[in-house]
Image (cartoon, rainbow, N blue to C red):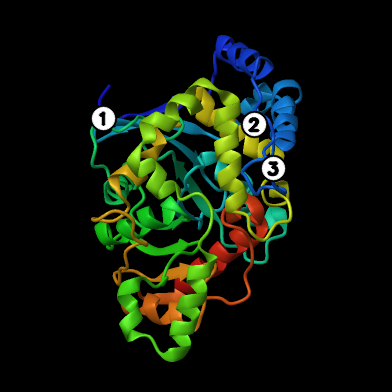
Amino acid sequence: MTSADIRQFRIDVPQSDLDDLIDRLTRARWTRQLPGQGWERGVPVDYLRELSEYWRTEFDWRAKEAALNEFPQFHTEIDGLAVHFLHVRSNDPDALPLILTHGWPNSFVEFTKTIPLLTNPSAHGMESAQAFHVVIPSIPGFGFSGTPRESGMKPRDVARMWVELMARLGYDRYGAQGGDLGAYVVQEMAIADPDHLIGVHIDGGIGLPTAADVPTMTAEERAEWDLMQKWQSGVNHHVLLRQAPQTFAHAWTDSPVGLLAWLVHKFNEFSPLADHLEEAVDRDQLLTNAAVYWFTDTAATSSWPMYNGLGDDGFAWPVGQKLVPMGVYSGGSPLMRRLAERDNTIAYWPEGNTGNHFLAMDVPRAHAADIQRFFDLIS
């Protein structure tokens, strides 16, 4: 067996780990509710207690584990790291290979609702017949993939791993899609493999202005920039996890309630259009994602994008590239379009699409349809 071998993988959490989780949830020590309204001070105690009790007494991990194992899963080694991935082939002989890259603090679970829509669109009444062979890897440090052993990993390193993975699977013409952290990776894939990657579709985060763009702005654009500054809110996880990821991860690794509170807090911040978090993210999908973090002990290792920095000097928006066509689910204002076109070959910039940050969880059907439209356009 060589490092290039692809081996079947099946999730099989030991019963002792499941028993330990239930025991820790049973013995949770609860904080007092601080003064304030709603989520003003963070995740409300009553909501977290109720959700944790559901996790302990009603959430069926074994059923979710079995459902996840319905998707063909594999392990291979790339650059000395084990890479876990789903590979779900369509029955359509004309299907386009498509690699999907998840975000943070998410996992491959992010895409479980969209897989059947992408692989078998006609069976689900999708407007387009465009089908895909879907590949969904777990980013190093996340889920069932190996963890970076040294500091310095960047999205470009993951991109090169994904290029190797697609080549190893025998795909010489393919598309790429991602949001959040995935948007960084797929743009880097285009830079690394423009001869085989036909286009990238991202959820958003392209063309967002920075302070360096202010001198080039018109008066109207400057007013928009000023308004954007007022929208900045929430816990800045880039700063927090850049400064002391190990410190916080001690609590998240020892306490499932602590881990759940952190994940719920971020998912809630990422769902500004929803009156309640669970309108944007299904409760069981939220807990399945939390369980993957818990059982794989990846609360700490998944923080590398923050402490290594998403840009060469810390935080930066995804890099631009003009090597392959780019499409976006949620484009933005004329200012964002102008800035996006400066560094990208924009082939698809729709208006009117809506949804919260994790679109594949929030609006899976609309998300899948948008991916189809983009690749219909450029194929």
Of the two numbered discs 3 and 1 on the same chain, state the one appearing first in sequence. Answer: 3
Residue at horizontal 70%, vertical 39%? Answer: 283
Provide the secondary structure element on which disc 3 rests: loop
Q: Is the residue 77 above or below the residue 358 in the image?
A: above
Residue at horizontal 55%, vertical 14%? Answer: 17
Residue 232: percent from left, percent from top: 50, 62
Residue 47: percent from left, percent from top: 73, 37
Q: Quote the CA–CA distance across marks 3 and 1.
A: 43 Å
Q: Can residue 379 be seen in this view?
A: no
- Marking on residue 67: 2
- Amino acid beneath label 1: Arg
Label 3: few (<14), some or many (≥20) within 10 Å?
A: few
Residue 263: percent from left, percent from top: 56, 39
Q: Quadrant location of residue 359?
A: bottom right
Can you tell which of label 2 and label 1 is closer to the viewer?
Answer: 1
Q: Which image quadrant: the C terminus? A: bottom left
Furthest residue toward bottom: 219
Residue at horizontal 72%, vertical 48%? Answer: 38
Marks counted in the figure total: 3
Q: Mark 1 points at which residue?
A: 149
Relative side of 49 to 146, left or right: right
Q: Mark 3 points at which residue?
A: 35
Label 2: few (<14), some or many (≥20) within 10 Å?
A: few
Q: Quote the CA–CA distance across marks 2 and 1.
A: 31 Å
Provide the secondary structure element on which disc 2 rests: helix
Q: Is residue 235 visible?
A: yes
Of the two numbered discs 2 and 1 on the same chain, state the one appearing first in sequence. Answer: 2
- Amino acid beneath label 3: Pro
Q: Quadrant location of residue 194?
A: bottom left
Residue at horizontal 26%, vertical 46%? Answer: 157
